[in-house]
Image (tube, rainbow, N blue to C red):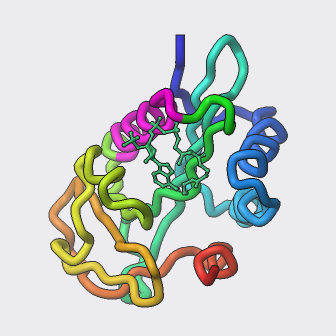
Amino acid sequence: MLICRTERPGDGEEIDELVCAAFGQEQAGDLVWALREQAAISLSQVAEYDGAIMGHLLMSSVFINGEDSGWLALSPVSVWPECQGQGIASALIRAALDCANELDWAGVVVLGKSDFFSRFGFKPAAEFGLEYSSANETLMAMAFKQPTIRGQVTYHPAFDTLLEK
Ligand SMILES: CC(C)(COP(=O)(O)OP(=O)(O)OC[C@H]1O[C@@H](n2cnc3c(N)ncnc32)[C@H](O)[C@@H]1OP(=O)(O)O)[C@@H](O)C(=O)NCCC(=O)NCCS
């Protein structure tokens, strides 16, 4: 059975290998490592099958208009290449959104394929007054609370290299 659970001490190495394998490059692994080093990970979940980690998802805080906002960014999401297309990321995303809501975060933003993320309830971030200026992709958002801040969303600096690509 597939279990979605919070990352535990000792999972780090397996997660790093998985992230590099999923993205086919070390840059995404470096991002996860940098977020971990800087204690910038707000939520880290894995999908486990028979004791092996098949998928991983991170959330980290974003700023809105430079202010700590209570909002999180969902990124990156990784699934082992040979396990993709079986609903693992979808299960992880749903579990992580429930967890973020229970932990009283205000909402979650994500940059990615809008047709994929809309199935979880994400809407264009502009509907919440949230903007992201330099992305090629549309910023999507899900609010757990009525947003109190509107404006420019900024990811943690560790994302700069990845998002500029
Ligand atoms: C994106 C990814 C996490 C999806 O994992 P998965 O377990 O195969 O996802 P699911 O089986 O739950 O859902 C499959 C859907 O993912 C979608 N998908 C594939 N690549 C995607 C991407 N880069 N961003 C968003 N969605 C993607 C597919 O369109 C597919 O949609 P469908 O159901 O309409 O066919 C996985 O393909 C992966 O690890 N890719 C490499 C890393 C990556 O690009 N991560 C996303 C950006 S952070």
In this picture, residue 155 sits left or right of residue 25: left
Residue at (36% x, 87% y) in the render: 152
43 vs 141, nearest the viewer? 141
The magenta span reads: 85-100
Q: Where is residue 155 in the image (x, y as percent from the top left)?
A: 52, 75
In the rendered image, residue 101, in percent from the top left (x then y), is placed at 31, 45
**Residue 7 lies in quadrant:** top right
Horizontal and vertical percent position of residue 55: 61, 35
Mainly helix, strand or loop, the magenta region?
helix
Q: In which quarter of the image is residue 69?
A: bottom left
Q: Residue at x 40, y 83 (%)?
A: 67
Picture quarter with the C terminus: bottom right
- Give left or right: position of 162 versus 128: right
Up the image or down, 19 lies above or below 141; here it is above
**37 vs 2: above or below:** below
**Residue 122 or residue 101, whichever sits in front:** 122
Above-or-below relation of 2 to 119:
above
Lateral position of residue 130 relative to residue 37, left or right: left
For the point 55% across and 28% down, the residue is 5
Residue located at (76% from left, 34% from top) = 11
Task: Say whether residue 95 is magenta.
Answer: yes
Does residue 124 show up magenta in the picture?
no
Number of marks: 0
Query: Would you say 57 lies left or right of 87 here?
Result: right
Position of 81 relative to 142 (above/below): above
Residue 64 percent coordinates (x, y)? 37, 81
Q: Quadrant of residue 57?
A: top right
